[in-house]
Amino acid sequence: MIPVILCGGTGSRLWPLSRDAYPKQFLALAGSQTMLQATALRLDGLPEVEAPILVCNESHRFAAAEQLQEVGRAAQSILLEPCARNTAPAIALAALRAVEQGQDPLLLVLPADHVVADTAAFQQSVSAAKKLAEDGLLVTFGIVPTCAETGYGYIRSGDALAGGWKVAEFVEKPDLATAEKYLANGDYNWNSGMFLFRASRYIEELAQQNPAILDACRAALAGAARDLDFTRVDADAFRRCPSDSVDYAVMEKTESAAVVPMQAGWSDVGSWSALWELAERDANDNLLRGDVLAEDSRGCLVHGADRLVGILGVQDLVVVDTDDALMVAHKSRVQDVKKLVQRLKQNERSEAENHRKVFRPWGYYDSIDAGPRFQVKRIVVKPGCQLSLQMHHHRAEHWIVVRGTARVTRGDDQLLLTENESTFIPLGVVHRLENPGSIPLELIEVQSGSYLGEDDIVRLEDKYGRE
């Protein structure tokens, strides 16, 4: 069995914490591990399980690989999507890669951004589904509903099978009255988006139900290139692939769909209210994280960052504070947070994509201050790492080391700077910053010039394979 971890979501309903460049699967929303890390660790103890295949957006590749390394896990393959094409193509890439390697394993398909509170129950359901998948069925896991939920699609069970049922039908997210009928009926489970099937069976069904997806994915893998520990599929071929979910492309059309029940404390954490329902709350039904003072307030979720947040005399509010954005919403409207994100994108605001702190394969930078013709950043470079050899057309830079040791390439010169030392990089001069030491290098960068955007970087050489 090979797990296939789908790591390509954006989690826009969890803005401002989840953003395009660092979405919810990389955040620790429901425990000490990030959601991706928890997904990988959930596999420990399952018999005959190989290292996972990870499918993610190419812009997230370093975050995904580093987070797995942090918990002592590694993917056997990390497939990079140049653009989002939904779950059916992502699974097709993994299935084709598995067969390409001369195997025909069972594929356990898991989104990277779900919460499963009961790992043992999760593994029991996977074990129950294994025989059905080995017999050629395409198994989905149906979450036994605990309430009349309107935020999930449902699966209606049909004829009984050993350990599950044939799928009678998939149904869309219902209104409340319909959800209450489903709950009373007992034949309906929530659609979890988790699957188990043999790689060849998925390929066969996709060839029959949606051959355009399979053809595009074959072409994308045929033109794939190795990039460090990653596999870049051919961008042009993959962009021609239709965008469709595995439900629409295969599961709703096949005659071989089965559903196995799961009662494992599951949630897709699709909104702030879902996180509020999951977590342990105080005596006033509040979920408070960070430096928060709550007085005479009930049923609220408050997520603080680095400053004090106070609420007084309010009820059923969601307040999320980050370094550069504050979001306040009524709990009944949190499904509409994505409308705020859409507005940000329409207005070309950076807060839709990036946090103030932006992670890079070498470390991160934090934009401290900015104004007309200047910008100040705090830069942290991990031991042994380096930025690209680069130059800028529109800005000059001052670097002041506040901790650690910096090796600086500045034109034809090489400098070694330590704490309280500085240098100046004139406009147009080729330069590179490295950390040759054993502790993180921290410095303050002051940029000045007519244009300070991140796209004013001409990379001449880069160990991370970035253009």
Image (spheres, grey):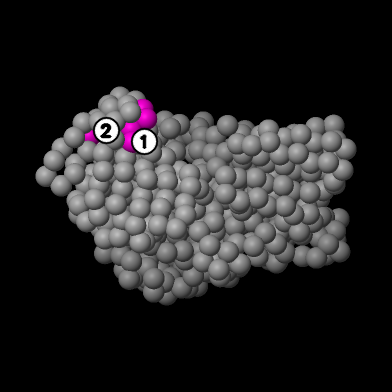
Q: Give the range drawn in magenta.
A: 400-407
**Any magenta on residue 273?**
no
Residue 405 in magenta stretch: yes
Q: In this view, does 248 lie to the left or right of 63?
A: right
Helix or strand or loop: what does disc 2 sit on? strand
- Pick the front one: 278 or 16: 16
Residue 53: in sight, yes or no? no
Can residue 320 be seen here? The reply is yes
Q: Residue at x 47, y 54 (%)?
A: 371
Give left or right: position of 456 versus 13.
Answer: left
Q: Position of residue 298 (x, y in %)?
A: 85, 41
**Sequence-first tag of 1 and 2:** 2
Residue depicted at x 31% and y 56%: 395
Name the residue carrying label 1: 443
Q: Are marks 1 and 2 in contact (CB under 8 Å)?
A: yes
Is 244 located above or below residue 41 in the figure? below
Mark 1 residue crowding within 10 angstroms, few (<14) / some (14–19) / many (20+): many
Disc 2 residue crowd, few under 14, some 14–19, many 20+, Cα 10 Å = many
Q: Is residue 451 above or below residue 119?
A: below
Residue shown at 88%/38% (left/top)?
296
Query: Which of the labelled discs sits on residue 406, or is there none?
Result: 2
Q: Which mark is residue 74?
A: none
